[in-house]
Amino acid sequence: MVLAAKIFEVKTPTSLEEIADKLRDFRRVENEKVDDHEFELITGVDDLDTKRNILTCIFYRDKIIFINQRGKVVPTLKTASARIYFHDVGGRIFLTVLQKKHFANAVASILSHHLFLTYRGVVEAQIPADNLRAFHERNPEATKVIYFDNLDFPGVDKVALYGDSLKTTGKYEEYLMHGKIWYLVFTVQGSSAVLGLTRNCVVTSFSRISEDKFMDYVVEHVFPLIK
């Protein structure tokens, strides 16, 4: 099963203690009616836990989906959830949402407004292209795929190098002259785990890996890359 996460940074000055206080009773209820069906949609957090430099909890959000029941399309309630982490790293607070990017973006937006009354309080973390390049070049044999963007080739948005093409340094240098590294797929050194990493801090594990080990890798190797 693919494990995905997206990393954000808290830009409004705060602390983990303040965040915990504001999340402890966070529960938002919205009522919505679809045809003859009435729904109570709840957004909130559960299992809040704080340790030294780490705050974690489960964020959940109800939504209405439509399913086919014996030829009739019926609205029903579905709850989507994600484990989230706040890490205090030398005074910088990172929010990591263990979910695909669209849900992660929604979580970050909701939490930013709840915690700081602005959608600018939590922003998308970014890895500079030079940092992603240095990350690849420290252990190029581990890289399986490289995507480049910001290309000045007419009509070309992205190009990829993979397989034997990665060994052709001429092509790699050519693409660096015309664009920037956007996405890497690589094998984690000392293991068989395969991860993907983008400049906007989407991290994906394509191998079976525990959530704890996944987060350990993110904290140790991805956080230092963020500008």
Image (cartoon, rainbow, N blue to C red):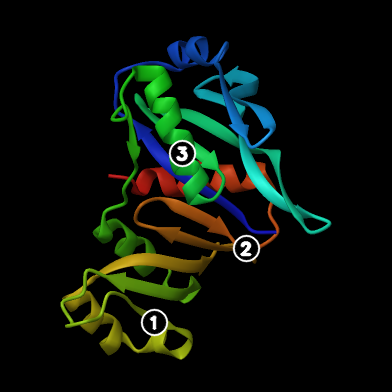
Q: Observer-nearest residue: 124 or 140?
A: 124
Residue 36 falls in image quadrant: top right
Q: Observer-nearest residue: 208 or 69?
A: 69
Give me the C-alpha separation between circle 1 and circle 3.
Answer: 32 Å
Which one is closest to the eye, mark 2 or mark 1? 1
Whether residue 138 appears in this view of the structure is no
Q: Observer-nearest residue: 68 or 61?
A: 68
Which one is closest to the eye, mark 1 or mark 3? 3
Q: Residue drawn at (15%, 77%), measured in percent from left and top? A: 152
Q: Please report whichever mark, 2 or 1, sits nearer to the chain's N-terminal start.
A: 1
Q: Amino acid at mark 1?
A: Leu
Q: Residues within 10 Å of mark 3 (few under 14, many from 20)?
A: few
Give me the C-alpha separation between circle 2 and circle 1.
Answer: 20 Å
Residue of label 2:
193
Residue that sits furthest to the right in the current view: 70
| In the image, residue 89 above or below residue 184 | above
Is there CB contact under 8 Å for labels 2 and 1? no
Q: Residue drawn at (62%, 63%), measured in percent from left and top? A: 193
Residue of label 1:
161
Whether residue 140 appears in this view of the structure is yes
Left or right for 172, reference 217: left
